[in-house]
């Protein structure tokens, strides 16, 4: 399971609070991704980064923010502007130069009440 | 934009039977077609993938077939076992060879002993 980690596994927050989800990888991958997973919806792309200090919005970026200050780290902040933040969040990484395969972290289940 | 349709959404088979899941896509430039398996509460894991320069790929009991003309690809699992029970996602890259993945909504496979 090693290579890409997410913490914490479960996270509980009150409505109106911002929360940051951690994603770290030691695979030396250039590209990193954040997905949101809801029941019956598959995986939807929130943000992605192909290189340090650069990132782009995915399909559902509203209410989220990211940073990519280090190659191995790509934290996701769920802001109070996100209307339905309760979901399972998955981080992934990919070797930009060669392989097409994305490797996933174990996920963080966020519950906002 | 790019769209991936996955069918069926649920599939129940008897142990030992075969299971087939099909995905269709819209971007003719797509050239990478992975299949992921996700057990309950776990991360998606790549089980097989295919590039557009081949029509079929097999790995033990799992095979993927690709029809680029018709823009569809399928996952075939033979001699199913209870441990094959999981949610299976297809995905397609879009926007070129380094493009992002778009996922189908998943198929929940149940293998009854």
Image: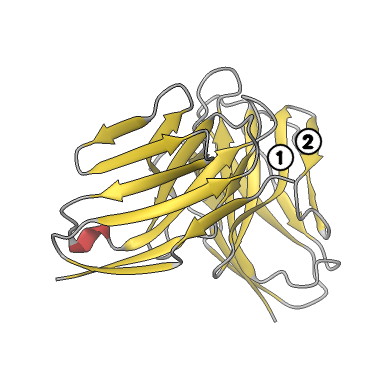
Question: Colour mode?
Answer: secondary structure
Label 1, secondary structure: give it: strand
- Name the one closer to the observer, B55 or A47: B55
- Residue lying at 66% horizontally and 26% vertically, measured from the top left: B96
* First of labels 1, 2 by sequence position: 1
Percent across and percent down for residue B91 are: 53, 44
Instruction: Say which chain tag 1 marks.
Output: A
Q: Mark 2 = which residue?
A: A55
Residue furthest toward the right? A81
Report crowding for label 1: few under 14, some 14 to 19, many 20 or more residues within 10 A (C-alpha): many
Distance Cα–Cα, label 1 vs label 2? 6 Å
The answer to whether residue B100 shows anywhere in this view is yes
Residue lying at 59% horizontally and 64% vertically, measured from the top left: A41
Badge 1 vs badge 2, beta-carbon distance below 8 Å: yes
Please name the residue that numbered disc 1 is placed on.
Answer: A48
Against B97, residue B77 (above or below) is: below
Secondary structure found at label 2: strand
Q: Is residue B3 above or below residue A88?
A: above
């Amino acid at each position: 399971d090693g290579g890409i980690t997410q913490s914490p596994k479960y996270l509980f927050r009150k409505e109106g609070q911002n929360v940051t989800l951690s994603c770290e990888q030691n695979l030396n991958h250039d590209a990193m991704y954040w997905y949101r997973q809801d029941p019956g919806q598959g995986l939807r792309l929130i943000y992605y980064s192909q290189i340090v200090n650069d990132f782009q919005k995915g399909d559902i970026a509203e209410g989220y923010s990211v940073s990519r200050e280090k190659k191995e780290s790509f934290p996701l902040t769920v802001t109070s502007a996100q209307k339905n933040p309760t979901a399972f969040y998955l981080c992934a990484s990919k070797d930009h130069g060669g392989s097409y395969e994305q490797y996933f972290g174990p996920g963080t289940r966020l519950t906002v009440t | 934009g790019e769209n991936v349709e996955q069918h069926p959404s649920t599939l129940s088979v008897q142990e030992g039977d075969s299971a087939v899941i099909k995905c269709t896509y819209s971007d003719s430039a797509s050239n990478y077609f992975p299949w992921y398996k996700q057990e309950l509460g776990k991360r998606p894991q790549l089980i097989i993938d295919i590039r557009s320069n081949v029509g079929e790929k097999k790995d033990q009991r799992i095979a993927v077939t690709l029809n680029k003309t018709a823009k569809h690809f399928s996952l075939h699992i033979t001699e199913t076992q209870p441990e094959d029970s999981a949610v299976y996602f297809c995905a397609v890259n879009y926007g070129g060879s380094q493009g992002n993945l778009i996922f189908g909504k998943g198929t929940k496979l149940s293998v009854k002993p």
